[in-house]
Image (cartoon, rainbow, N blue to C red):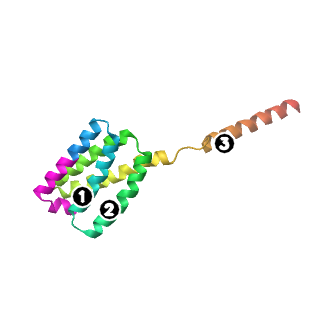
Amino acid sequence: MAAHLADHLTQVQIDRLRAHVEAEAEALRCDDQASWQKLSAEFHYLLAEMTQNPLVQRQAQELISRTLMLVKRYETSAGSACGCDEHRAIFRALAGRERGKAVKAMTTHLSLVETRLRPTLCEPVGPSLEDALREEIASHRTAGAAMAIAG
């Protein structure tokens, strides 16, 4: 999608994207998390729409909807600032018609979204395996030392 858009965006589309990333930045500056999340999702919808490909638009809509549910549940406000910066990087590459940079910026952004969600999804549920083993070894050493003293 990014490669295609870097080659085919019109000036009107570039202006529309510019206004959109500026609105995202403003929502973030005002600490309006709900508006920023909505605008963030719309950024991706907007890109899909600009391809003028119904298949891409439908696929993007499904992926964006699923991702947005996870972002609303798990992403921190710090992640919002990162996402906003990433959208600006994508926009700059697209507006500059820099295909390679646009693809790299989009790939990086999507990877970072996944990374920002992962740590909160994998919260520890108890002591780590290393801590449990260390505790078990210590209790066996203590029991062995007590047996040696008693014997």
- Please, what is the three-letter code of the amino acid marked with disc 1? Leu
Task: Estimate how packed mark 1 is, as few (under 14), some (14 to 19) or many (20 or more) residues with alpha carbons within 10 Å.
Answer: many
Residue 132 in sight here? yes
The span shown in magenta is 1-20
Horizontal and vertical percent position of residue 89? 23, 48
Q: Tell me what residue is drawn at x 18 percent, y 54 percent.
A: 94
Horizontal and vertical percent position of residue 115? 41, 49
> Magenta-highlighted stretch: main secondary structure?
helix
Q: Could you tell which of marks 1 and 3 lies nearer the N-terminus?
A: 1
Direction from residue 129 to residue 35 in the image, left or right: left
Q: Tell me what residue is drawn at x 12 percent, y 56 percent.
A: 12
Q: Is residue 9 a member of the stretch shown in magenta?
A: yes
Q: Could you tell which of marks 2 and 1 lies nearer the N-terminus?
A: 1
Q: Is residue 50 a member of the stretch shown in magenta?
A: no
Residue 96 in sight here? no
According to the picture, the residue beneath numbered tag 3 turns out to be 133
Looking at the rendering, in which quadrant would you find the C terminus?
A: top right
Q: Could you tell which of marks 2 and 3 lies nearer the N-terminus?
A: 2
Question: In the rendered view, would you say 147 is above or below 1?
Answer: above
Identify the mark at residue 102; answer none if there is no mark. none
Q: Tell me what residue is drawn at x 27 percent, y 43 percent.
A: 85
- Please, what is the three-letter code of the amino acid marked with disc 2? Ala
Among all residues in the image, which is located at the extreme top? 149
Identify the mark at residue 60; answer none if there is no mark. 2
Kindly indicate whether the residue at mark 1 contacts the one at mark 2 (C-beta within 8 angstroms): yes
According to the picture, the residue beneath numbered tag 1 turns out to be 47
Query: Dot 2 lies on which element?
Result: helix
- Please, what is the three-letter code of the amino acid marked with disc 3? Leu
Horizontal and vertical percent position of residue 29? 27, 36
Task: Estimate how packed mark 2 is, as few (under 14), some (14 to 19) or many (20 or more) residues with alpha carbons within 10 Å.
Answer: some
Mark 2 or 3: the one toward you? 2
